[in-house]
Image (cartoon, coloured by chain):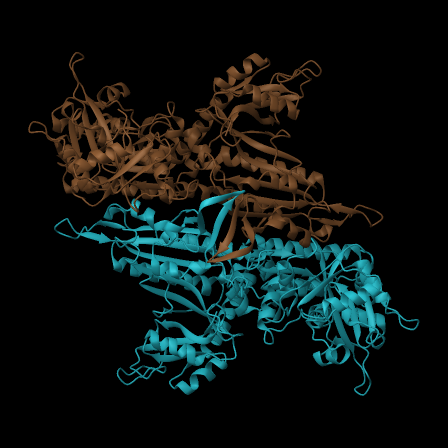
Chain colours: A cyan, B brown
C-alpha cells in the first residue's frame, strides 16, 4: 500500500473528518525517534499524544488462517495481552511478525497505524479500541500516516468516527477499558501464594510479554541497538527528548549519577590542590580565534549570539565550545611570578558544540555538561605527572563508580586535541556495536598556548642564574562529560532495560510487597507493607539507598518490571511466607539470581551483595572488552576483525599518512562518509600504555599492518563514536 | 589643562614617540571602571598593563612650598611609601589632596597620569620611576591621556623616552627598584620583638598607608561606594573583569562561597523531596513566548542564537532567562495522574538576561548562576506551604551562612514575578547606599501556567466524586542566585577590604609567623614556621579551614594586609615570645580585637571564636538594618527618610496606581530615569509578614501615606537595586 498525505486527507474528508494537522518528517524507527521528529517539526499542534497500534497473533493451528487482533490505545495505557486474551476468549496473544504485518497491511511496523485498517483489512481482523480514547474526545492524537515519515493528527472523536466508519452489521470494534481489565485480571487470577509470586512466572510474564509485543517498543539490544538505547533511556526515565533538536533533558534518574560523579571527582581534585571557578560562557570572536590550530577544530560548531532583545549586537559573541581561549588571557594576567605556579582551576559547566548530524543522547549532544580543568605548571615534568594523575581519576570514575572497564593510552597525532602537545585518553568499548568510545581525555598543551604570540603566560625562570631567563608556563586541560552516563547505559543495559551499577544508583535497593491479592485482609496487607517499609528504613539507616514500593493498584509483576526497566541493582521481595520465615528474597538485576536473606543478616548481607554486583558487572564487561581486543598482524584480517565487532590491535608505524590510509581502506563504501557520525572507517583509538599485555614486538622485525614500515607500538584501531 | 588625544599624539610625535594605540571610552573613576572600559573598547592592544601614577606630599613646614613626589610604577609593583621616604631622605609621605593635584597639574585624580608631567610641572616635583618599566621595554602600558575617558598605550621604552625628554641637567628622574627597596627596608628596620610585631603599629602601618595613598585604589566605602565595591572584589581576588561586558569571572575566593551555599541548600531541598535535573539552556521562540505576561517581563533582555558555524539557523533560538516555559511542556507530559504530584525539580544553572545598562558584579550581570526550583502540587495549600518553606531556607542561607539579616514579606502586585500569583521575598538592605535589595524570591504561580490554554498541566481530581473533575496543577518557582555573594560583600566589607563570615570563608583562620627578621637565625626561623604549620594543621584536624602563610620574602605586615583585604575572619600570630609563652595572638577581622590564646586551649577556643564572629557580624548588621527602618506616617517625611539612607515603612493602601504615584513623586528629577538602574524613585520593597514589629494600625483610621485612602498594612518603601 502506498499512500500520500493528500490521498489520506481526501479519504478522511469523504467521511467528514478534518485532521487537526499533518506533517512530513524524518524517517522514524522507534517511538523515541518518532517523538523527536515530531518535536522538531514546524507545525504540530501545541499538545498531543501518540497513539500506539499493536498487532497480536492468537495461537492457532498452523493450518488455520490467523485472525490478528489489532489494539489501538493511548501510548500510556497498559494493555495487558494476557488479560485481553482472556477477555476475548483466545488462547494466547503473541506479537505479530513483520511477515504477518506485510501480509495483512502491506506495511512495516514503523509505518503501521490505525489508518492501516480500511474496508479491505478491517473484516480480516479483530479491532480493540482503548475506551479512554473515546472518553477524551478533544484530545489530539498523533498517528502515523501509513508511513514512518509522516504523521497525521486526529481528535479522539475523529479516531472513533474513523473506526466506526469501517464497521459492518456483522463486525464491530470492541471498546475495552484496560484499567478495569487489569483489576479484573488480578481478581480473577489471584496469585495464590508468596512462592508463586516470588517465582515470578505468573506475574513477571505479563509485563515481559507486554514489553515484547508492543510494536517498536520492545526493541532488542542485539537487533536494533540504536533504537534499544533510546528506548532504555526513555523507559528508565533518564532522559526526555526536547523541542530543540540535539538537546535533551536530564531527568533525576540520570542527573543523580552525574551528581555522584561530581562529588567523587571534586573531592579528589581538591585534594590535588585544584580550585573550582566559573568563567563566562560567552567569548568574543577576537579571543576565540586567537589560537589557530585550536579554533580550526571547533569553528564549524560554534553557536553565535547576534541579537539581544530586539537589538543586533555590534559584534557576534560565541558560546564556549571549550574554555581554553576564554581562560588563558586571565592566566597571563594572574601568573606574574613563578610563585603563582602551579595554577590549577576547574569548572563544572555547560558547553555548546552545534553539531549538524546524528545527535545521540549523552554521546553527542549540542549542549552538554562536563568539567574542564585548566592548569599551568612551572615544568613539563609537573604537567606530565598531572596529566596522568587526572587520567587515573577518569579511569577510576568509570571502573570504580560505573563498573565500566577502560584502557589508558595516548592518542595518535591525528586524533589528539586541537592545540595539544599530546592527548591521553581512557578508551572504552561498546560490545553491542563493536565500536570504541573516547571516554575522557587529559591533554598536555605544552607551551602552545603560553607562547608569546599566543597568550604570553610567562614568568622569570627561577632556575636561570642570570635572572633574565623567561619561562613559558606548561599547561594542561582535561575534561569528563555526561558521556559517562551514555557509556554506562550502553555497556550494562539489557533487554529488560537499564542495569545500574550500585555505587551510582539513585535507588540501590527496592523492596516490593508480594502475595497481596484481592482476598488479602487489611491486617495482613498492612503487616506486609509495614515489613517492607521497615526493611527499607533499616537499610537507609546503614547508608543504603533503599526504597519500599508500596503503590496501591499495581501488581508485584508490574512493579518488578518497572524497577527492572529503571535498572535498580537489587530487589527484595516480602510476602506472607517470608514473614513467617523472617526472611526476604533478593533478586539481582544484573544476573536475575534469587536468594533468600534472613532478616537478621540483612544489614551485613545487602552491602556485601551490592559490592558483589558491582564487581561482577565490572568483570563481565572487562571480559567482554578483552575478548574483543584482537591482535591483528595481517591486513587481510583487519576489516573482518572490525566487521566481527572487534577492536583490531595492530603493530603500527604511528604515521599520520598511514592512519589516513587505513581509515580509507577500511571504510565500507556503502556507508555514508560522515566524519562526525560513528565512522565506518577505522581510526586509531589509543596506543595503550600497557604494551606488555600484547605479544612482544621485535624491533626492526615487526612491521606496520597498515603500510609495512617498521612498527613502533601496538595500537588499537576500531570503528568508533 | 585640557588636551585632546590628537594634541597629545602630536606632542609625542615631536619627540618621535608613536603610541601603540589610543582609545576614547566611558568616564572612569577607579582602576576597576578603567579596566572595564578598556575591556569593552574595540581597538586595544592584545595585551597591556596599566601604569599607576601616585602623587605624595612630603611632610613640610606649613609655610614652605611643597615638592610633591610623583611615583610612576607598574600596577603590580608594591610601592612602599615609607621605604621610599627613607630612600629619598624625606620625613613622611602622605597622599596628595585633590587641591594639590589641581594646583600642580590642573587635573583630578581620575585623569592623572605620567603625561601630566611636562616642561612646566616636571621641574616642580620629584619624579620616581619604577625600574621594572625600563627593564621591560616591549611591554605595552595603558596611560590616561589627561582625561578619565581616554587612554593611550605606550611601550616601556617610550614611557622612559617621554620622561627622559623632560630631564634637565639639574633634574633627572630617579629609577627605583621597589623590590630591592622592600627587602632593604626589612633589613634596615627589623621588627625588634614579637610584641612589636603583634602590636602591629610598625608593620601594619605600612600596608595601610600603602592602601590609602595609591590614587584611586584606597577608595573609602563611605565616600564612593560603587568604586569601593569594585575595588574590594578585585583586591580580594573574588572577581575578575571579563572581555565581554556585563560578564565576570568568579574566582575561587568567591566561587567557594557559592559551593558552600549549594551544599547547604541541596541537602535541605533534597530532604524536602526535591530532585535535581538539567534542562537545556536553549529554548525555541515558540515555546518561550507561550505565556504572554511572563515573557513580557523578559523579552527585552533575551539573547538569541542565530548562527552556528557559518550557517544561519532556520529559526533563532533563545538562551533561557529563566526556565518556566522551558520546563512546563514536559511537566504536562509527565504529570498524568494525581499520583504524579507533587513533582519537585530543581536545577543549578546559568541564565542570561542581556541587560543594557549598569552591570554590577554579582548584583546585575548578563550571565549569572542560580538555582531554580519548579514544583507542581495537587492543592493550593501544599503550594502555599512550600513557598514559605523555601523562603525560610533563603532566610537561613543569608542569616546562618552569610550573617546578613533579612526581612521576609510579600511583594506588591506591581513588583511580583511576571506570571506569578504572588511573590514572597527575603529583602535585604545595604546600609552604605541606603538601598533595599531583593535577595531571593519564592513564587506561587497559582494555575497561571497549568491552565488549558497555557501548558495544560492537568490530572483527574481525586476528590471529585463524579470522577470527571479535572484539576490543574498548582505551581511554584523559586530562585536564589550569586547575588548572595554581592550582598554579603556590601554589607560586611570595610575600608580594609572584604570581611568574610566564618561559615562560608574558604580560609577561616590564617596563621602568620611574626618577629622573623634578617637577624633571625635559620633554627629560630624554622622553629616559628613549624609552630605555625603545626597550629594550622591541628585546626584542620578539627574541621577548621586553616592555613599557615609561610611565604618567604614578605613581611608580616604585608601578609596581615593581604589577608585582611581577603577578609579572612581570624588571624593567628606566632612570634618568638609566643613560643616561649606557648600561646598565639588572635586578631579578629571584623572588630580588630586582639587576644592571646594558650596553645593548649586552641581547639576549643577557635571554633567558639569563629561562631562568636558570625554572631557579632550578624547582630551588627541586624542593628544597622533595624535602625534604618523608619515608620513614616506623613508624606513630608517620606523623601527625607529616603535621602537619609533609610527605608520608609508606611501604612499603605496596596494599590498599584498609588505605588506608581509614590515612585514618581519620590524620584529626584536630576537623576536619570532608568527602570533597571538603582532607581531614584522609591518602590515597595516588601509587605513584611511580621506586622507586629510596627505600631498597630487602627482599621479605618490608618491612612495610606501615598494617597490618603485606607491603609492595609505597613509596607517597606525604599530606593533599591
**Which quadrant holds residue B315?**
bottom right
| Residue B571 showing in the rendered view | no
Tell me the residue at 36%/34% (across/down).
B33
**Residue B446 % position (x, y):** 69, 39
Q: Check the image and name the residue furthest to the left.
A: B169
In the image, is residue B703 above or below residue B146?
A: above
- Near-viewer residue (B134 or A386): B134
- Near-viewer residue (A50 or A433): A50
| Residue A172 showing in the rendered view | yes
**Residue B212 % position (x, y):** 28, 26
- In the image: residue B15, left or right of residue A137: left
In the image, is residue B504 above or below residue A645?
A: above
Number of labels in the image equals 0
- Near-viewer residue (A218 or B600): A218
**Residue A16 % position (x, y):** 84, 61
- In the image: residue B113, left or right of residue A616: left
Which quarter of the figure is the N terminus of chain B placed in? Answer: top left
- In the image: residue B73, left or right of residue A361: left
**Residue B16 % position (x, y):** 17, 39
Tell me the residue at 61%/39% (across/down).
B296
In the image, is residue B542 above or below residue A372?
A: above
Q: Check the image and name the residue furthest to the right.
A: A169
**Which quadrant holds residue B683?**
top right
Amino acid at each position: 500500500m502506498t499512500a500520500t498525505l493528500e490521498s489520506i486527507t481526501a479519504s478522511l474528508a469523504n467521511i467528514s473528518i478534518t485532521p487537526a494537522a499533518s506533517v512530513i518528517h524524518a524517517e522514524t524507527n522507534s517511538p523515541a525517534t518518532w517523538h523527536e521528529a515530531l518535536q522538531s517539526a514546524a507545525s504540530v499542534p501545541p499538545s498531543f499524544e501518540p497513539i500506539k497500534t499493536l498487532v497480536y497473533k492468537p495461537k492457532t493451528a498452523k493450518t488455520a488462517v490467523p485472525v490478528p487482533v489489532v489494539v489501538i490505545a493511548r501510548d500510556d495505557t497498559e494493555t495487558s495481552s494476557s488479560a485481553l486474551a482472556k477477555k476475548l476468549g483466545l488462547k494466547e496473544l503473541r506479537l505479530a511478525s513483520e511477515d504477518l504485518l506485510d501480509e495483512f497491511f502491506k506495511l512495516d511496523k514503523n509505518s503501521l497505524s490505525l489508518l492501516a485498517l480500511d474496508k479491505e483489512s478491517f473484516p480480516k481482523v479483530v479491532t480493540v479500541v482503548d475506551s479512554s480514547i473515546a472518553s477524551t474526545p478533544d484530545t489530539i492524537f498523533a498517528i502515523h500516516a501509513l508511513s514512518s515519515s509522516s504523521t497525521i493528527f486526529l481528535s479522539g472523536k475523529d479516531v472513533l468516527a474513523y473506526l466506526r466508519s469501517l464497521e459492518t452489521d456483522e463486525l464491530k470494534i470492541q471498546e475495552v477499558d484496560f484499567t478495569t481489565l487489569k483489576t479484573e485480571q488480578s481478581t480473577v487470577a489471584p496469585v495464590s501464594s508468596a512462592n508463586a509470586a516470588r517465582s515470578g512466572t505468573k506475574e513477571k510474564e505479563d509485563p515481559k510479554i507486554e514489553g515484547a509485543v508492543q510494536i517498536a517498543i520492545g526493541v532488542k539490544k542485539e537487533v536494533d541497538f540504536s533504537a534499544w538505547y533510546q528506548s532504555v533511556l526513555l523507559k528508565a526515565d533518564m532522559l526526555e527528548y526536547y523541542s530543540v533538536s540535539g538537546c535533551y533533558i536530564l531527568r533525576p534518574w540520570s542527573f543523580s549519577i552525574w551528581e555522584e560523579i561530581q562529588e567523587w571527582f571534586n573531592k579528589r581534585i581538591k585534594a590535588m590542590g585544584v580550585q573550582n571557578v566559573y568563567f563566562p560562557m560567552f567569548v568574543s570572536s577576537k579571543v576565540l580565534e586567537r589560537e589557530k590550530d585550536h579554533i580550526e577544530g571547533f569553528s564549524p560548531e560554534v553557536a553565535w549570539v547576534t541579537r539581544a532583545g530586539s537589538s543586533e549586537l555590534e559584534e557576534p559573541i560565541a558560546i564556549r565550545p571549550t574554555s581554553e581561549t576564554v581562560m588563558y588571557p586571565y592566566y597571563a594576567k594572574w601568573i606574574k611570578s613563578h610563585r603563582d605556579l602551579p595554577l590549577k582551576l576547574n569548572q563544572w559547566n555547560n558547553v555548546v558544540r552545534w553539531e549538524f548530524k546524528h545527535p545521540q543522547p549523552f554521546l553527542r549532544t549540542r549542549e552538554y555538561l562536563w568539567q574542564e580543568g585548566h592548569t599551568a605548571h612551572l615544568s613539563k615534568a609537573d604537567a606530565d605527572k598531572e596529566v596522568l594523575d587526572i587520567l587515573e581519576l577518569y579511569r577510576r570514575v568509570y571502573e570504580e563508580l560505573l563498573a565500566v572497564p577502560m584502557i589508558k593510552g595516548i592518542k595518535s597525532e591525528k586524533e589528539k586535541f586541537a592545540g595539544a602537545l599530546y592527548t591521553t585518553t581512557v578508551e572504552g568499548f561498546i560490545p553491542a556495536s563493536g565500536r570504541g568510545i573516547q571516554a575522557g581525555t587529559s591533554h598536555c598543551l605544552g607551551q602552545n598556548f603560553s607562547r608569546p604570540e599566543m597568550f604570553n603566560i610567562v614568568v622569570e625562570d627561577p632556575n636561570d642564574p642570570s635572572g633574565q631567563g623567561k619561562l613559558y608556563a606548561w599547561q594542561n586541560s582535561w575534561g569528563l562529560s555526561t558521556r559517562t552516563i551514555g557509556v554506562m547505559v550502553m555497556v550494562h543495559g539489557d533487554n529488560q532495560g537499564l542495569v545500574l551499577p550500585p555505587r551510582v544508583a539513585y535507588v540501590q535497593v527496592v523492596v516490593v510487597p508480594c502475595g497481596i491479592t484481592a482476598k488479602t485482609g487489611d491486617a495482613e496487607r498492612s503487616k506486609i507493607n509495614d515489613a517492607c517499609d521497615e526493611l527499607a528504613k533499616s537499610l537507609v539507616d546503614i547508608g543504603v539507598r533503599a526504597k519500599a514500593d508500596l503503590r496501591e493498584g499495581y501488581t508485584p509483576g508490574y512493579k518488578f518490571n518497572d524497577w527492572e526497566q529503571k535498572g535498580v541493582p537489587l530487589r527484595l521481595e516480602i510476602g506472607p511466607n517470608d514473614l513467617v520465615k523472617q526472611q526476604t528474597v533478593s533478586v539481582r538485576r544484573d544476573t536475575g539470581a534469587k536468594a533468600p536473606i534472613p532478616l537478621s543478616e540483612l544489614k551485613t548481607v545487602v552491602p556485601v551483595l551490592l559490592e558483589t554486583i558491582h564487581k561482577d558487572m565490572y568483570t563481565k564487561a572487562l571480559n567482554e572488552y578483552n575478548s574483543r581486543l584482537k591482535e591483528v598482524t595481517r591486513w587481510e584480517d583487519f576489516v573482518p576483525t572490525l566487521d566481527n565487532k572487534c577492536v583490531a590491535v595492530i603493530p603500527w608505524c604511528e604515521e599520520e599518512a598511514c592512519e589516513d590510509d587505513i581509515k580509507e581502506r577500511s571504510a565500507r563504501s556503502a556507508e555514508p562518509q560522515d566524519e562526525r557520525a560513528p565512522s565506518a572507517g577505522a581510526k586509531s583509538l589509543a596506543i595503550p600504555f600497557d604494551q606488555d599485555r600484547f605479544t612482544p614486538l621485535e624491533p626492526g622485525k615487526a612491521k606496520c599492518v597498515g603500510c609495512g614500515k617498521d612498527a613502533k607500538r601496538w595500537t588499537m584501531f576500531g570503528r568508533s563514536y
